[in-house]
Image: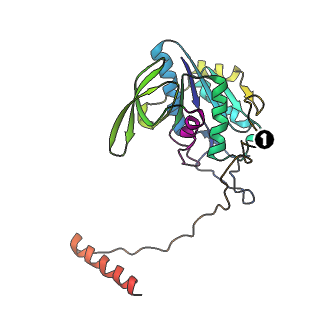
Amino acid sequence: MNIVVCIKQVPDTTDVRINPQTNTLMREGVASIINPFDAYAIEEGVRIRERLGEGTVTVVTMGPPQADAALREAISLGADEAVLLCSRAFAGGDTWSTSLTLALAMKKLAPDVVLAGKQAIDGDTAQVGPGISCHLDWPQACYVSKIREIEKGRAVVECLMETGKEVLEVELPAVLTVVKEINEPRLPSLKGKMRAKKAVITTWNEQDIEADPQKVGLNGSPTAVNRVFSPPRRGGGEIIQAETASEAAKIVVAKIKELQIA
């Protein structure tokens, strides 16, 4: 089975900086990590291969040359191969153009299943995984917490919803975005680290995936960030003290009424 895992290299959440001129993330000189949700997708891809006793796990990311480090880490965690989508044409893309770029790579890789984390911690949109499936016109299942069955052509999955769990049967190829409840990612082994260090990372640009430069990256993005700023700090609140919850509620209601009159 050909398993492809889409990952993203993101800035460490303790070190996020925004370029005030371009309103984009500043990645140069900033510590980066594999998006935490994507680590569960890598682990699940490896587990599927181990469960079936055959197959290949290929990890794909779109990013600058330094994203090579995230791909090597993924190989140390059990992935077999890695592809870096790297070109100036891809830079500055929103979720629409990013998912299109990844979808074009999927056409070339021809996977049986695509796995990804439910969202990236730097954007929190949860749009890229579903976007890939829409561009490819493939089935999708989001917030997958368990893969019950998977074989050539079909999979049965549990999706973690707000009201409980949904069990879906999907035709493959499909895109599955996973949540952290799906597994516990393993630590890299010494053998995995050595293999990752020697691994040859395949790099593709827009010509390699037959992408129209006007439809990817910033040129192909229908949305744009006009301004990024930190909201002003709020003043301190007021602590309501009362002997019972009922009395406290009455005090709160009275204060709200005072504010409305004012």
- Please give the residue where the numbered disc 1 appears in the rendered image: 88
For the residue labelled by badge 1, is the local secondary structure a helix, a strand or a loop? helix
Query: What colouring does the structure picture have?
Result: rainbow
In magenta, the rendered stretch is 118-137
Q: In the rendered view of the protein, which quadrant contains the C terminus?
A: bottom left
Is 127 magenta? The answer is yes
Q: Specify whether 254 is left or right of 17.
A: left
> Is residue 70 visible to the viewer in this orientation of the structure?
no
Residue 136 vs 190, above or below: the answer is below
Residue 162 location (% of width, % of height) = 36, 46
Residue drawn 63% across the image and 28% down it: 106
Left or right side of 224 for 243 = left
Is residue 128 rendered magenta in the image?
A: yes
Tell me which corner region of the image, top left, top right, bottom left or bottom right, holds residue 168. Answer: top left
Return the x and y of residue 12 as percentages of the image width and height. Answer: 60, 45
Q: Is 166 on the left or on the right of 94, as rendered?
A: left
Asked whether 192 or 60 is in front, the reply is 60
What is the x, y in percent for residue 159?
39, 36
Check disc 1: other Cα within 10 Å, few if <14, some if 14-19, many if 20+: few
- Residue depicted at 36% across the width and 85% down the height: 258
Q: Is residue 241 left or right of residue 14?
A: left
Q: Where is residue 31? Give x, y as percent.
A: 66, 44
Residue 241, quarter of the rendered image: bottom left
Q: Residue at x 72, y 44 (%)?
A: 217
Residue 11 against residue 107 in the figure, above or below: below
Residue 51 visible (yes or no): yes
Task: Pick whichever, 82 or 132, lies toward us.
Answer: 132
- From the viewer's side, name the closer residue of 53 and 33: 53
Q: Amino acid at mark 1?
A: Arg
